[in-house]
Image (cartoon, rainbow, N blue to C red):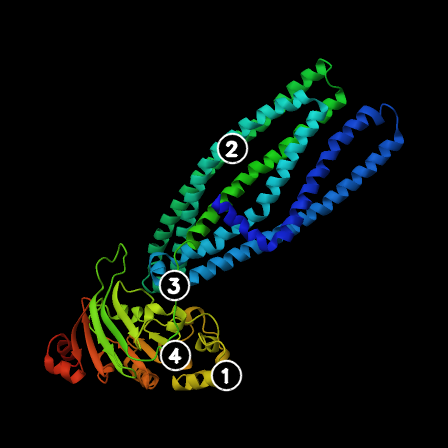
Amino acid sequence: MKKLKRFFAYYKPHRKLFAFDMVCAFLISVCNMFYPMIARNIMNDYVPNKNLQLLIIWAILLALIYALKSILTYIVGYWGHVLGVRIQGDMRRDLFNHVESLSFSFFDENKTGVVMSRIINDLFEVSELAHHAPEDVFNSCISIVGALVMLGFINPWLSLIVLCYVPFMIFFAAKARNRMSKAFDESRKKVAVLNAEIESSITGVRVTKAYNAECTERAKFDDVNAQFKTARTHSYRAMGGFHAGMSAFNDFLYLIALISGGLFFFFGQITAPDFTAYILYITMLLTPIRTLVTLFEQIQDGMTGFNRFCQLMDTEPEYQPSQPIKADLDGDIVFENVTFSYHTAEEKGDVLKGVSFTLQKGKTLALVGGSGGGKTTICHLLPRFYVRDSGKITIGGTDINDVTSSDLRENIAMVAQDVFLFAGSIRDNIRYGSPNAREEDIILAAKRANIHDFIATLPSGYDTEVGERGVKLSGGQKQRVSIARAFLKNPPILILDEATSALDNMTEMQIQSALQQLSTGRTTIVVAHRLSTVKNADEILVVTDGKIAQRGTHEQLVAQGGLYADLYRYQFKE
């Protein structure tokens, strides 16, 4: 019941259009009621009594009714679908906004293709349900009740026979629907898995070709495709049993109508025109029943999609304080005995184990150490991409858990190793996060990032399209665009997470100068494997196994010996 209320809540902004659609559907049902009764009167009265005038009048009236029905059918077909599209758009907007509010941990656990399937495929079925279900159910119920009432006018006992038969049809439909529900839910899950596999394969097609792994991708696709086909087969088996059973009930209703109506006519309880009208009303009764049978599949698809929509909408968004405060987040960064674990099946145990350090405002802190030691995790905890398990993280004395994520991240810029550029122009990507930036500020940021001269050589300049994920630019060019993005944002805190490790030595040297300029006057955290990029940091922390093993300046750590000195000697042994 709660889900039904939640579903129909999306009709509220469009209630006028919904009411208009339902009124038109009701009038269509009323129009359908006239033909059998008019036909009965013509055969009972107008033809035997040779009343040509009434025959012509009722024929014209019937023609007008059909013309009105045609107009109403157009309105329902057009505006009904518009209603469904608008509801679908509202749901998709709410779902997308909610997905944008989810934490990093959600995306760690859920594949992109699965999320896309819920936003696109599932909601398409929901929109079809939103249009057809209320309209068809209402229309069918009116038609069924109207047909039974009109049958009662012809002969109450014949109407009672039909009325006693209908509950058996409803009972069968309810039982068969439960089987369909489980089968279609499993089918939906397999569609999402299939979408995820396709999305992954297409995104990584360059790697696939580079490693000549087309056969591997085909095998993976065939596996998930076979699972989808199996699940879909089961769902159609349940649906086939449902349709077969309902078809049998329909046929036997015709048989019962013919036998009972024939016997009543044989014993003189009804006239031939009454018998004809009776059969016509039985036909009218079966039409909405067939509509409901067809609608069951749509209801099943739509409600399965809506259930998955609700599951995603009910996923907890990322942490926000209940009573956020406004604070100046431009000061010393302090980690006090911070612990953290990812709480996933793949990663168990603490990733950080009681990490403590202080980074003074305007200074540069470098994090070095082996892979998996916790360096990137420290960088992700500061902008609260993940929430610490225990301990405290403050900026300028303010606990980062006491401010909203938007206020916190407004003061932090991150330049990572894996640069993500959005499909669009170079200008769009530089001003991403600063949508109201002036053109001169965008150009100044590009100049500081040493990318302006390259952009000036392009035929379309800043309007040049970068392609999906920036595929039209080189690694160094993409990195410079991300640096220009950080320059434009101009935050007090900067995080450089292995920003040059994927570049060649010459490109690294060129970009390093831009990074040094970007770091000037900012509180900066640098993560690097190449110690040449962190030698000038104010303090260096050696992070291994979730703990800080060593700390000090470059000269102090080399003199101390230990892990840092070993790394230094290994990298500079020549």
Do the numbered discs 2 and 4 sit on residues whose CB atoms are within 8 Å? no
**Kind of residue at disc 3:** Ser
Q: In the rendered structure, which disc, 4 or 1, sits on the residue that comes first in sequence?
A: 1
Q: Earlier in the sequence, mark 1 or mark 3?
A: 3
Q: Secondary structure at mark 1?
A: helix
Tell me how far mark 2 sits from mark 4, CA to CA. Answer: 61 Å
Position of the C terminus, as image quadrant, is bottom left
- Few, some or many residues within 10 Å of mark 4 (<14, 14–19, 20+): many
Q: Position of residue 74 (x, y in %)?
A: 69, 48
Alpha carbon of mark 1 to alpha carbon of mark 3: how far? 38 Å
The Cα–Cα distance between marks 4 and 1, rounded to whole angstroms, is 16 Å
Residue 322 is marked as 3
Would you name the residue on which mark 4 appears? 486
Which of the marked residues, 2 or 4, is nearer the chain's N terminus?
A: 2
Q: Which residue is mark 2?
A: 173
For the point 76% across and 44% down, which residue is it? Answer: 67
Give the image location of residue 342, x and y in percent. 27, 60
On screen, 149 above or below 368?
above
Task: Check if mark 4's residue and mark 3's residue have beta carbons within 8 Å.
Answer: no
Label 4 or label 3, whichever lies nearer to me, is 3
Residue corresponding to mark 1 = 439
Q: Is residue 457 visible to the viewer in this orientation of the structure?
A: no
Residue 353: x, y in percent? 20, 65
What is the distance, in whole Å, between disc 1 and disc 2 at their CAs? 64 Å
Q: Vertically, is 94 above or below 18?
A: below
Q: Residues within 10 Å of mark 1 (few under 14, many from 20)?
A: few
